[in-house]
Image (tube, rainbow, N blue to C red):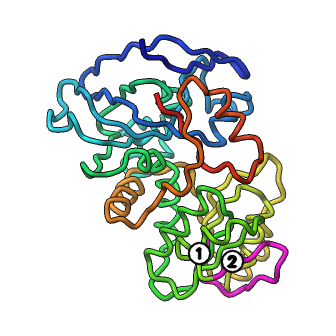
Amino acid sequence: MSTAVVVDAPGEHRLVPHEPRRPGAGEALVRVHAAGICGSDREVYQGNRPEGYVRYPLTPGHEWSGTVEAVGTGVPESLVGRKVVGEGFRNCQVCDRCHAGDTTLCTAGYEETGFTQPGAMAATLTLPARLLHALPDDCDLTAAALLEPAACIAAAALKGNARPGERVAVVGTGTLGMFAVQFLKANSPAELLVVGTRRDREALSRSYGATDFRTKDQQLPDDFDVVIETAGSADAARISAGLLRRGGRLVLTGIPAPDADGLDPTDLVVRQLEVHTVFGAPPDAWAHTVRVFAAGLLDPLPLVTHELPLTEFSQAIALVGAGDPTVGKVLLRP
């Protein structure tokens, strides 16, 4: 009997028997290969995810990869057997923001796989087929399980619009930061600086294409064209803005704690900084991610440090929140 994780309430979870749900019209049934855990999953378990952005009881899992086993009416049969990943936001498709392609800003309300809809910490996942992105047949599904965070950073890279020969930087050296390095490297920058808090991330940063690495307490430049912030703190946002030349482009992807001190609006105006933010990944970012991954320009596997069975959900959550520098991406395998 296959199982699924169910978080009944903050701090309370159980393993339950899992019965695949047959796909209805427009849906697909996916056999899950692996599901990743990130800080948002820990928020779900601890109960500190913002109100309206979680619905208990819940099967978590918004980062995943798998293989299509069946499809409902209206879905091409050719999708069966394909390796896939899938968008999380269950957008309405008819509001103004959805028509503009900004599906993460859907005005019909927030619905997302693994937060308000059943997620991938189960043997199978049934979801709208329109959310799926097919992968190359020879791809590594373990690596592909990290494409959801990669897609969020792809959204940042697209907004930053770094051009060949520009000087670019990444602030933050976690999973998102390392993906940002890879996306920016693909644009042939003149320089690619990584700023972090841990010197032990320098070798990995350079292996992904960084030309310089500094910790935040070192002297930092102030003349970069594009900076992507991935650390999720107010301090990181300020450091990122400080790295930019006048008229530079800043993309914020992290979510600081509530009521954190923000950027200086006077500085933003006087230096005419162009500031963008990212919350999730719209379809164009997902499509871009899959193309870059298929081209061999993304290498997620070095970021994975732990693969555990689904039954070790508690241990996986503990690993993610332990603050251990040796813990990278944690995957659960059904």
Q: Label 2 sits on what residue type?
A: Phe
Q: Nearer the viewer, residue 160 or 322?
A: 322
Q: Which residues are magenta?
A: 212-227
Decide if residue 15 is on the left or right side of residue 9: left
Q: Which residue is found at the position 79% from the left and 75% from the top?
A: 266
Q: Is residue 39 above or below residue 252?
A: above
Label 2 sits on residue: 213
Image location (x, y in percent) of residue 109: 52, 33
Q: Nearer the viewer, residue 147 or 207?
A: 207
Q: Quadrant of residue 81?
A: top left
Q: Is residue 268 above or below residue 123?
A: below
Decide if residue 253 is on the left or right side of residue 285: right
Decide if residue 112 is on the left or right side of residue 170: left
Do residues under tags 2 and 1 come within 8 Å of each other at their CB atoms?
Answer: yes
Label 1 sits on residue: 206
Q: Which residue is found at the position 52% from the left and 31% from the top?
A: 114
Q: Which residue is found at the position 73% from the left and 65% from the top?
A: 237
Q: Is residue 221 highlighted in magenta?
A: yes
Disc assigned to residue 58: none
Question: Dot 2: within a 10 Å radius of its alpha carbon, few (fewer than 14), some, or many (20 or more) residues?
Answer: many
Image location (x, y in percent) of residue 143: 44, 50
Decide if residue 268 is on the left or right side of residue 6: right
Q: Which residue is found at the position 74% from the left and 82% from the top?
A: 270
Quadrant showing the N terminus:
top left
View extreme (left): residue: 77
Image location (x, y in percent) of residue 230: 65, 60
Question: Dot 1: within a 10 Å radius of its alpha carbon, few (fewer than 14), some, or many (20 or more) residues?
Answer: some
Q: Secondary structure at mark 1?
A: helix
First-in-chain label (2 vs 1): 1
Q: Is residue 73 above or below residue 8?
A: below
